[in-house]
Amino acid sequence: MAASARASAHLHSLPESSEAASVESLALQACDDIDSLHEVKRAYVCLEKLIVPQGLSDTEEVYPTRTELSALVRVVNEELQRRIETAGTTMQSLRVAVSESGTR
């Protein structure tokens, strides 16, 4: 709540054109975030269908759709990439720290 008030106060202190650009940027980011949540939801539905089929006679319920499988693969790949980048950043920081401690 306090962060929201600070962000609002910050927006009001910006010139009109900067404020409009900021609001537009936030709106675009919100739309992207919602799309991302829909992608995660499709991935979850896919995973749920793979684990617990609803009924053997209804192929729509038993088998995930191509879109759901695609969402699952994409979400897994993005998370894997994020974790690889995090590990790489950590290793780079460790390498810098080790080299700095070796020169002391």
Image (cartoon, grey):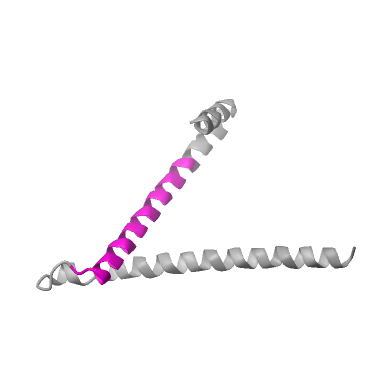
Residue at 37%, 53% in the rendered image: 37
Q: Nearer the viewer, residue 71 or 14?
A: 71
Question: Measured along the vertical axis of the image, is residue 56 above or below residue 31?
Answer: below
User: Could you tell me what secondary structure mostly forms the magenta stretch?
Assistant: helix
Residue at 58%, 30% in the rendered image: 10
Q: Nearer the viewer, residue 28 or 41?
A: 41
Image coords of residue 90 (percent x, y): 66, 64
Residue 36 falls inside the magenta stretch? yes
Relative placement, left or right, of 97 versus 53 is right
Q: Residue 65: in sight, yes or no?
A: no
- In the picture, the quarter occupied by the C terminus is bottom right
Image coords of residue 85 (percent x, y): 59, 65
Residue at 70%, 66% in the rendered image: 92
Residue at 68%, 67% in the rendered image: 91
Residue 28 falls inside the magenta stretch? yes
Question: Measured along the vertical axis of the image, is residue 13 above or below residue 18?
Answer: above
